[in-house]
Amino acid sequence: MTPPPDAPRMDNRRGPRWPVHRSLRYYYWRFIRLRGTPEDIARGMAVGVFAGFYPLFGLQIAIAVVLASLCRGSKIAAAAFTWVSNPLTYLPIYAMNFHLGQWILGSQSQSFTLDDLQSLDGISQLGLEFTVTLFFGSTVAALIAGAIAYVGGLWLVRSLRHKHGRSPAHRARRRHSHRL
């Protein structure tokens, strides 16, 4: 009996292999092989997450790349990690940013509905207080998330490079063993 055409290909060692598996594996290896030190890549990740926490659709990647250039981080990692805010996550992130801004500034009087955010007209009617509150909350959340992304990214890059023998110590040992 032949399997249906959309069934995953079976690999005896690893189980079913969906087409997504190949894409994820490709990007995993691209991440491991990014040029730069772990610190450079982690800085890029941090500024990407930082820029992703701002409600500036269409400008987040440009902001992240400029910030990565200024702080000597990986521009590719910065652009990729702006996707922390994507169509599935931007609403919860920006609602959290707004409420964080309200809590820190102590301005509990203003509220909004999803209908207010559906158009530029609706957003502009919310006024300056809404914008200041949202951007203040976004800045605080972006700083915290960026710091977490830097520390987590540094650990991740170092551990993955060590695991796959791409750390400077591994390369030096390999180079030295070939000379003997």
Image: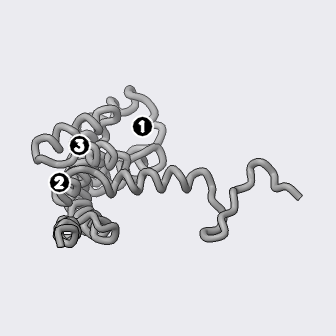
Circles 1 and 2: CB atoms closer than 8 Å: no
Query: Where 180 sits versus 43, above or below?
Result: below
- Image position, residue 137 (x, y; %): 24, 52
Residue placed most toward the observer, 23 or 118: 23
**Quadrant location, the N terminus:** bottom right
Residue placed most toward the observer, 128 or 42: 42
Q: Name the front one of labels 1 and 2.
A: 2
Please give left or right for residue 40 compared with residue 157 in the image: left
Tell me where residue 67 sits by quadrant: top left
Q: Earlier in the sequence, mark 3 or mark 1?
A: 3
The residue indicated by pointer 3 is 75
Q: Name the front one of labels 3 and 1.
A: 3
Colour pattern? one colour
The residue indicated by pointer 1 is 117
Tag 2 secondary structure:
helix
Tag 3 secondary structure:
helix
Residue type at mark 1 is Leu
**Residue at image point 26% right, 53% down:** 45
> Local crowd at mark 3 within 10 Å, few (<14), some, or many (≥20)?
many
Which mark, by number, is residue 40?
2
Rounded to the nearest angstrom, the CA distance separating label 3 from label 1 is 31 Å
- Image position, residue 89 (x, y; %): 43, 50
